[in-house]
Amino acid sequence: MTARLIDGNALSRQIRADVARRAAALTAQGLTPGLAVILVGDNPASQVYVRNKVKACQDNGLHSVLEHYPATLSEADLLSRVQALNQDPTIHGILVQLPLPPHIDAHKVIETISPLKDVDGFHVASAGALMVGQSGFKPCTPYGCMKMLESIGCDPKGKHAVVIGRSNIVGKPMALMLLQAHATITICHSATPDLAHHTRQADIVVVAVGRRNVLTADMVKPGAVVLDVGMNRTDDGKLCGDVDFDGVSKVASAITPVPGGVGPMTITMLLVNTLEAAERAAQMR
């Protein structure tokens, strides 16, 4: 068996075309969807992520504002800036790029963002809405994963899904989204004994721990769907995920590559969330 590749780039193009169409319709009504991105410090990876997010906005009809501050910016000044953006009617989404310098409490910053503009889906109000099944902004990476399952006709209903990782950004919301789609969920993490015991029973495996080769071919049920959220580098510097791609792709029925899998979808779902925030704002005018 050779697994089907779930092409995140191709799916992103489809979704972004719809975003661009809807953004153009809003702009014609006098409301251009706007995203403010705040970067504090000079983390090289963060600079790349931020640049990609801003470009994606520009390419798809959204207005974006990048605010880059030195790592010495005080927590109070950052909170003040976020509060000002909360009140800015031209901004519908606010994203503060993580990680932040050690002297700034990231949780406090996230909670200062208005839930109406929390397009990252990290606010406690967004997490609570997801928990109880109400409408709110979904975290972009697991949201993208659900779209990828949908794109290949994989309905989680009645399936056993194993999520490896328990972060607030991916693992926990991923499990909740799969649960809402009527899957049976197992969450595994660093303290899970015999990880393979769980993954061998899974119809869907989502791996999000940030460590190479966490999932190998002998740990995968034949025909399972594997979503690799990890982003690492091989010994020779090439990008890779958390999954042993060469081995697992011979056992799974479908798999996401790294790069070109989940990564593009994360930014795409950020655009979707920002657009939906703008559409809600338009309804409230």
Image (spheres, helix red, strand yellow):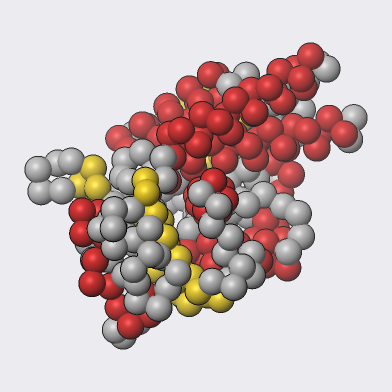
Q: Residue furthest front?
A: 1
Rendered residue at 67%/49% (across/down):
137
Percent across and percent down for residue 129 are: 72, 61
190 and 50: which one is in front? Answer: 190
Instruction: Give the mark count.
Output: 0
Residue farthest toward the bottom in the current orientation of the protein: 193
Q: Is residue 148 above or below residue 204?
A: above
Q: Position of residue 234 (x, y in %)?
A: 15, 48
Q: Quadrant of residue 82?
A: top right
Q: Position of residue 229 (x, y in %)?
A: 39, 53
Q: Report x, y in % for residue 266.
A: 49, 42
Which image quarter is the N terminus in? bottom left
* Quadrant, the C terminus: top right
User: Is residue 83 visible in this depiction of the protein?
Assistant: no
Drawn side of residue 107 relative to residue 61, left or right: left
Asked which quadrant contains residue 62, the reply is top right
Res. 45 visible in picture: yes
Q: Which residue sits at x=31%, y=40%?
A: 259
Q: Left or right? Give the position of 252 relative to 31.
A: left
Whether 219 is drawn above or below 91: the answer is below
Q: In the image as oriented, which residue stretches furthest toward the left?
A: 236
- The residue depicted at 42 percent of the width and 60 percent of the height is 225
Snapshot quadrant of residue 61: top right
Determine the residue positioned at 73% across, 68% down: 132
Front residue of this view, candidates 57 and 201: 201
131 vs 97, nearest the viewer? 131
Q: Judge left or right: residue 152 versus residue 215.
A: right
User: Does residue 249 appear left or right of residue 85 in this picture?
Assistant: left
In depth, the one of 261 and 114 nearer the eye is: 261
